[in-house]
Amino acid sequence: MSSSVWENLVVDAHDPARLARWWAEALGYRITVDTPDEVEIRRTPDTLPGLVFVPVRDEKQVKNRLHIDLRPDDQEAEVERLVDMGARHVDVGQSDVEWTVLADPEGNEFCVLRRRDSAG
């Protein structure tokens, strides 16, 4: 029986280098590949999965069908830090929920979750 290993999540970007640097700072990752065709970030060069940013000419048009969820120790402080870095609050129809929906500098939505209870 064969299986696969999750290598990367690929993100289309108008400016891959800029967006990769933003996500690397947000996640505490580092750039492991930096070419005109792709910029990859990972926690360490050998840690999977990575995020790969590839160039596209068109701007983002609609809500993402796939997004990243972050779970910090302090949701409020992390939201503030990410907004200070250039993220913005967005409404994707989430109503009254326990997470905060933000968008990165190119408009890709992601969620900042509450801290997970240690008992759960």
Image (cartoon, grey):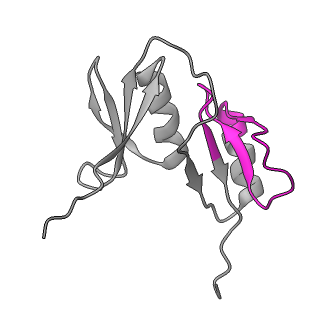
* Near-viewer residue (64 or 47): 64
Left or right: 93 with respect to 39? right
Left or right: 59 with respect to 2? right
State which quadrant residue 6 falls in: bottom left
Which residue reaches farthest bottom? 119
* Near-viewer residue (21 or 49): 49
The number of numbered badges drawn on the structure is 0
Residue at point 49% right, 28% down? Answer: 19
Majority secondary structure in the magenta region: loop
Work out which quarter of the rendered image holds the N terminus and state it.
bottom left
Q: Position of residue 72 (x, y in %)?
A: 63, 61
* Near-viewer residue (95 or 108): 95
Q: Position of residue 38 (x, y in %)?
A: 31, 26
- Residue 42, relative to residue 33: is it above or below? below
- Residue 79, relative to residue 21: is it above or below? below
Work out which quarter of the rendered image holds the C terminus and state it.
bottom right
100 magenta-colored: yes
* Near-viewer residue (63 or 101): 63
Q: Position of residue 44 (x, y in %)?
A: 31, 51
Which residue reaches farthest top? 57
What is the magenta range? Answer: 83-110
17 magenta-colored: no
Residue at point 46% right, 18% down? Answer: 15
Residue at point 65% right, 73% down? Answer: 116
- Residue 91, relative to residue 54: is it above or below? below
State which quadrant residue 115 falls in: bottom right
